[in-house]
Amino acid sequence: MTEVLDRIASHLVGLRMPRALEALDHTVQQIEKGELSTLEAIDSLLAEELSVRESRRIGVAMMTARLTPPKTLEGFDFAFQPSLDRDRIMALAQLDFIERTEVVHFLGPPGTGKSHLAVALGVAAVKAGKSVYRCTLAELIEALSRSEREGRLVEKIRFYSRASLLIIDEIGYLPITTGGANLFFQLVNARYEKGAMILTSNRGFAEWGDVFGDPVVATALLDRLLHHAVVVQIEGASYRLRSHADLIPEHVRTNAPISPPPPKRRRGRPPKNRKIEMT
Ligand code: ADP
Ligand code: MG
């Protein structure tokens, strides 16, 4: 009996199953006490090992995908953002859009949960075993420009084309040079109808000419990015500013257009101990 146990233990070491090895003695005791049948014991040892491996895989994949800080759909307060159709987001979480290599656009003003939803869908995709990669548009263009200078653009585009879901965050915050827009176009072209994307932007499509500094490239980009696309428009207040409503001018709080009306100046200074994160 001990001999067999020793052999099982060394098999588990050879197979690199540390969690099952750890649980072995206790499981054998459970069999001896009649708490588990032999089959149940095998099942429980394998299940323990599998669940440890699965959570490690998910942890590594989330880091590699740069899905940090991690967000979930369970952690999203839909009541705060009534313009958002919860069922529609939950349908996206079924991930069929990845199979269909579609592009999901989250559009809306700052703080309305665009990045949160994009990351949460990315996390759902990682859990389902899909390869995911997330970056901001500025990071993407910076990486592509560097690779171009080093003569490795093709390789880099291949890298960004590999993931079954590419999340490109923060389109529209920073102006893009014509060179940058061309590089982005090459990537979009490489992924077109081959891989799914989630894009987030605080600017409407009509403003893409300004964002990319060139209406011709912007039109070519939109042609591909809207062909098989799901557009989710969020109209609402910033979640970041929700607890500072009294300090924020009306037009910022409600994400109303900036002009007109001009913001009213508040008299006096706001209390020093309040921090406002406005990115
Ligand atoms: P955006 O990308 O639209 O600027 P984020 O998704 O980064 O906004 O949201 C800003 C912060 O507020 C994040 O920490 C995010 O998790 C949180 N947040 C935004 N909307 C919600 C919401 N409806 N429920 C819970 N947390 C939210
Ligand atoms: Mg964001």
Image: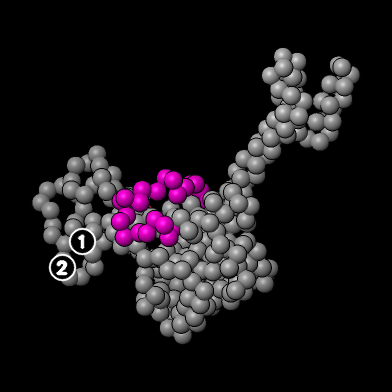
Residue 168 drawn at (x, y percent): 50, 63
Residue at 29% in and 59% down: 236
Give amino acid for label 2.
Pro
- In the picture, the quarter occupied by the N terminus is top right
Q: Is 166 contained in the magenta span?
A: no
Q: Which residues are magenta?
A: 66-89
User: How much space separates mark 2 and mark 1, taking CA atoms?
Assistant: 8 Å
Q: Is residue 242 above or below residue 170?
A: above
Query: Which of the two labelled residues, at mark 2 and mark 1, occupies the earlier sequence position?
Result: 1
Label 2 CB, ligand 1: below 8 Å? no
Contact, mark 2 vs mark 1 (Cβ under 8 Å): yes
Instruction: Single out the residue that lies furthest toward the right.
Output: 3
In the figure, is residue 76 to the left or right of 196?
left
Residue hosting label 2: 261
Residue hosting label 1: 251
277 vs 177, nearest the viewer: 277
Instruction: Single out the residue that lies furthest toward the left.
Output: 267
214 vs 8, nearest the viewer: 8
Residue at 49% in and 80% down: 223
Q: Is residue 45 above or below residue 195?
A: above
In the figure, is residue 8 to the left or right of 195?
right
Instruction: Give the structural element (helix, strand or loop) at label 2.
Output: loop
Bin the neighbour count of mark 2 within 10 Å (Cα to Cα): few under 14, some 14-19, many 20 and up: few
Q: Quadrant of residue 257?
A: bottom left
Residue 180 drawn at (x, y percent): 51, 73
Q: How is the image coloured?
A: one colour
Q: Decide whether the magenta segment is chiefly helix, strand or loop.
A: loop
Bin the neighbour count of mark 1 within 10 Å (Cα to Cα): few under 14, some 14-19, many 20 and up: some
Residue 57 drawn at (x, y percent): 65, 44
Give amino acid for label 1.
His
